[in-house]
Amino acid sequence: MFDRILLATSATEACDHAARVAFNMAERYKSYLNIFHVLGLPTRAYSQDVIDVKTRERVTADEEYVAWVKEEIRGYYERLLEKTGDNYGIEVAVGSPHREILRAARNNDPDLVVMGGSTGHMEDSSYKKTTAGSTFQRVAKAAHCPVLVVTRPAASFWGGFSRIVLGTDFSEASDVAFEYALQLARALDCELFLFHAVDVSAMAMGKVMAQDDIEEKLRVARRRMRSRYVPKMPDFESYTMDAWEGLPYVEITKYAREKQADLIIMAHHAKRDASGQAPMGSTMEQVIVRAACPVLSINRSVKK
Amino acid sequence: MPEGTLCNKQPVDTEEQLKALLADKGGQIYYEEMKHLDVDVEMLRQTLGKSLKSRLRTWLSMCARCGMCADSCFFYRINDRDPKQVPAYKIQSTLGEIVRKNGNVDNAFMHMAMETAWAKCTCCNRCAMYCPHGIDVGVMISYLRGLLYQQGFVPWEMKVGAGMHRVYRAQMDVTPEDFVDTFEWMVEEYEEDYPGLNVPVDKDDADILYTVNAREVKHYPEDLAEAAILFNIAGENWTVPSKGWELTSLAMFAGDWEACRLQVESVYDAMDRLKPKRMVGTECGHAHRATVVEGPYWAGRPDGLPPVESIHYVEWVAEALRTGKLKIDPEKRIKEPVTIQDSCNYIRNHGLRDVTREIMSYIVEPGYFIDMAPNGEHNYCCGGGGGFNGIGLYRPQRNKALITKRDQIMHTGASLVIAPCHNCWDAIRDLEEEYQIGIRWSFLKPLLIDMVVVPEHMKPKE
């Protein structure tokens, strides 16, 4: 499942949790780990000058500098690199981070992209802590492979996949996510928890719902889960299905915690807003910044 | 005659030479070598004899030094009205001197002329509108750049840029394979959102041949996707050429006349090969000037026109909105104070002022569009035109030059600046980085994508 992992990293603290997970996975699944770093976009037309991620200084991204950056990255991950042996490579690119990560994902065809949270240079830190970062948004939208994001330290103390929560909203994208979750659960012998949250907030429903309505919705959701997913896993038994009511991101986070999940899988919805990002405050966004385990994002174009 | 290994009179013609030049960090060795570069007086005389024609000779001699051009120049205004920034002074003290001395100038003079040509003029041609004799200093500075380039006195990035065009027929190291592959990649990425999206490559007899800026391919391929989406939504019969897709010309900024011709001929070859009805170029100002306005003369075309009718992206957008090929959802029109940057190269120098205003009337909620003052053909350069954005040696001067545009934008009170020109877009991005006035800036395409009505057959099923 994980022959090739692409770790997109700023090689700073912001990506430490993601890096730890990526290295652990590479060790456990004997994956080739491609450590990928983007220097940033040239600061002026047709020049090679970029802003260094760490120092925020203007530097010339020539061969010498790239070699130095690679050495810095090797140094930064020195201890973690013991886990991979020689089975790794370091790549450095110049450009917009999301674009270059997508380019690398297209060229190297990894089984998984691992990313951290926001790099933390945004001025508005309260904003930053409640969203998952625009680079992740853009990569998750377009990548043809699953994207694993790890933003919290709690999510990185992790020993392998054994309990997977799939959050579904019954969309086509969720079906793709289900297929992947099932495949992963089979390959790694995991327990699979299929979960749907009925959004009962007045904002979503346009009114305060009667309890009978809520319970009816929960019954419908359970029926839908059974009819949609059970026929697709005839020879797979270690699954559980649940539907809870509430604010979806809260319920998914709570559910994952209660089930001691070590992975949450969700579908990334392809719609963009003006900034090229999925709508802020979407369920996935919120789960990512709150979950105590890594979150795997799957969009409709992920290869089965 | 000490010619440097990097700084010399030879153009860059091979990938190897290009790499050697690029390996010289920021042009350190290059500029050191330039200090010892000799002027080939004989060559300069011969070039003057062959290329300095009556128009420029007349302009030089009839200039009355009246100073009417002074206030028209944003460099003069932001540099404490320094007399040395008066356009007439800038050209008389450089090209004028070269002519008067019949080419008998030295290294120090050429250094001064280089700084004048690339750091004191963006060839925006604004001064020509205020000269009582109609003298166009921008045109003369462009000519001066040609003389300087030939002698090897050209900023490092300009030599690199011209070399790129010579080697790749593009302003960056993007090959035809890279170009086609990137376009296909973008279709892969967006076809989920826009079913049926496609990019026809090398299609014969299309209605539209679309040409781009290599930077889009290299760093902002979303722009290619957006162009494809909008052509598809509009139902256009369009294509891109696998060769001859680069609309821009850093060779023009550099004064490399030979490379200018090579570059524009590659686009005209694509027109001859594919026989489209029209060419539409991307949102770039200088590229329009190079390929549509000046290019025909470089290529020696007797009618002074490209092989097929060639229009700027704003002309296509205005037409598509006017004819209903693109329909705007009124709910999604821009509802924040917004202004537009008039690119010198197709507004002042190619008369498209009303076209961009027409676009605003469709995409901005009435009452939210605020014009800069002055505007239209009287607008000031963004501050980074003519190659100025790209030259590291003159970065401090460039940053200062952005002040005019910064103040113009601030006076409008706009929070969004639409800049349908790569150079303007870069300059406005840089001025926000430098001065942090709290604006956003955008090309037209991403704005249109968010407000255009998508026909049923192009909506995702889900």
Image (cartoon, grey):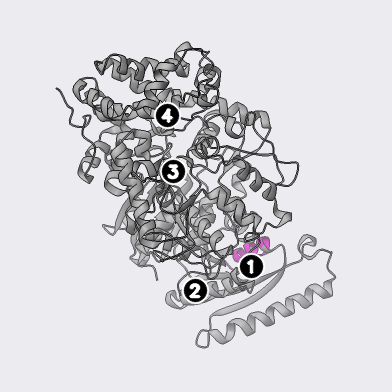
Q: Which of marks 1 and 4 is in front?
A: 4
Quadrant in which residue A291 is drawn: bottom right
Q: Nearer the viewer, mark 4 or mark 3?
A: 4
The residue singled out by tag 2 in the image is: A180
Q: Magenta stretch?
A: A249-262
Circle 1 marks a residue in which chain?
B
| Residue at 61% across, 26% down | B407
Q: Which of marks 3 and 1 is in front?
A: 3
Circle 4 Cα neighbour tier, 10 Å, few/some/many (<14 / 14–19 / ≥20)? some
Q: In this view, does B160 lie above or below B459?
A: above
The residue singled out by tag 1 in the image is: B455
Residue B419 location in percent, x, y?
56, 41
> Looking at numbered disc 1 in the image, what kind of residue is underneath it?
Pro
Q: In this view, does A210 lie above or below A102?
A: below
Circle 2 marks a residue in which chain?
A
- Assign the N terminus of chain A to one quadrant of the image: bottom left
